[in-house]
Image (spheres, rainbow, N blue to C red):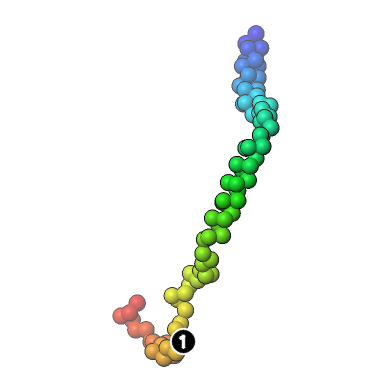
Amino acid sequence: MRVLPAVGLLTLLVAGPAFAQIKPPAASDPPKTPGQIETEKSADQAYKNSLRNIPDKPAADPWGGAHAMEGSSSASTTPTRRTKSSY
């Protein structure tokens, strides 16, 4: 007799999250009026115009400071010898 309530409780515990995942039917939006359509078109046009006003940036070079300078002769071509004291 204890099995039946345990099965019922287990069923409720498993079925609860499954029912929570079911989405309610989406409410359909009413059709837009011609004034709303014109307002959206003007807002979209203003947005596109504002994007055109942003100046173009040159390509970013994150390693620009790490490149060797042209004409730089201060860099030695032979590696320096390491001593035990420099470890």
The N terminus is located in which quarter?
top right
Q: Residue at 67% of width from left, 30% of height from top? A: 30
The spot of residue 65 in percent (x, y) is 43, 75
The single residue placed furthest to the left in the displayed view is 85
The x and y percentages for residue 55 are: 51, 64
- Residue 35 visible in this rendered orientation of the protein: yes
Judge by depth and name the residue closer to the eye, 31 or 67: 31
Q: On the picture, is 18 further left or further right than 50?
A: right
Q: Is residue 18 left or right of residue 52?
A: right
- Asked which quadrant contains residue 9, the reply is top right
Q: Is residue 18 visible?
A: no
The amino acid at mark 1 is Glu
Crowding around mark 1 (Cα neighbors within 10 Å: few <14, some 14 to 19, many 20+) is few
Of helix, strand and loop, which one carries label 1? loop
Q: Nearer the viewer, residue 83 or 72?
A: 72
Residue that mark 1 sits on: 70
At x 63% / y 12%, what residue is drawn? 5
Q: Quadrant of the C terminus?
A: bottom left
Residue 21's quadrant in the figure? Answer: top right
Residue name at image x 65 percent, y 40 percent: 37
Q: Is residue 69 above or below residue 54?
A: below
